[in-house]
Amino acid sequence: MNKRKLFTGASALSPTRLPAFTVCAAFFLIGVLAGTAASGPYADGGGADGYVSGFSAALSSGSLDWSAAGIFFKLSLYHASAFLLGFSMLGVALIPLVCLIRGFTLAFSLAVLARLGSFSGAAAGCLLVGVPALVAVPLLFLIASDALGASFSLLRACLTHSPVQAECCSGSSFIRFFAALILLFLLSLGERALVTSGVIDFSLP
């Protein structure tokens, strides 16, 4: 298999990948809408200021694990969960749920930060949450759509007693997954550097 086929195939929405991608994207969007809606009452009740103040205090005291490894774990948790669920028939139901939860948590965090009275606090929070998501979310769609197709293939094989044809079990899928982990780790190093350098200011008025 040549390199061009391996990496361009990761983003190509083939007829077999398109339905899985659509399902993952739809559940992610549902999570985004739910997270945005839930952020309103929370922020209006003073939760936004407490959200950032608590984070800043925990970061200053050292009680918050903001090491590169800790950031990497938080970023890659959804990707690893989706990938592993691709080896189970349960993934048909649980992989879309993973996408929904990721959409909810991302939208909730960004919406709460956007409601902050402090522009610097909101901008800093959005930088930490929103910018990594520009890389992490497309990678999640890639991993989750492959995994959902694999899980559905397992379910179909079980119901029809036919051979399993799952892309998630191919070598290229493993390479794409580990390449995604490498990108997420590099992203974690950058996020760690931003926090420790003092460039980001979480001060509130």
Image (cartoon, helix red, strand yellow):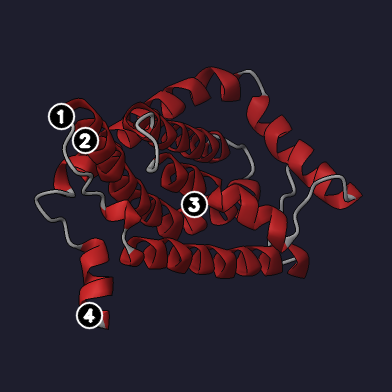
| Front: mark 2 or 4 | 2
Q: Is residue 202 left or right of residue 186?
A: right
Nearest to viewer (mark 4 / mark 3): 4
Mark 4: few, some, or many residues within 10 Å (few <14, many ≥20)? few
32 or 11: which is nearer to us? 11
Near mark 1 (Cα within 10 A), the count class, few <14, some 14-19 or many ≥20, is few
Q: CA distance from mark 3 to mark 1?
A: 43 Å
Q: Which residue is mark 2?
A: 157
Residues under numbered marks 2 and 3 in contact, where contact means CB atoms less than 8 Å apart: no
Amino acid, disc 2: Ala
Q: Secondary structure at mark 4?
A: helix
In this orientation, which residue lies closer to the viewer: 31 or 119? 31
CA gap, disc 1 and disc 4? 34 Å
User: Which amino acid type is marked by label 4?
Assistant: Arg
Type of amino acid at the residue the image marks with label 1: Thr
Residue carrying label 1? 160
Crowding near the residue tagged with mark 3, few <14, some 14–19, many ≥20 C-alpha atoms within 10 Å: some
Residue 69 placement: quadrant:
bottom right
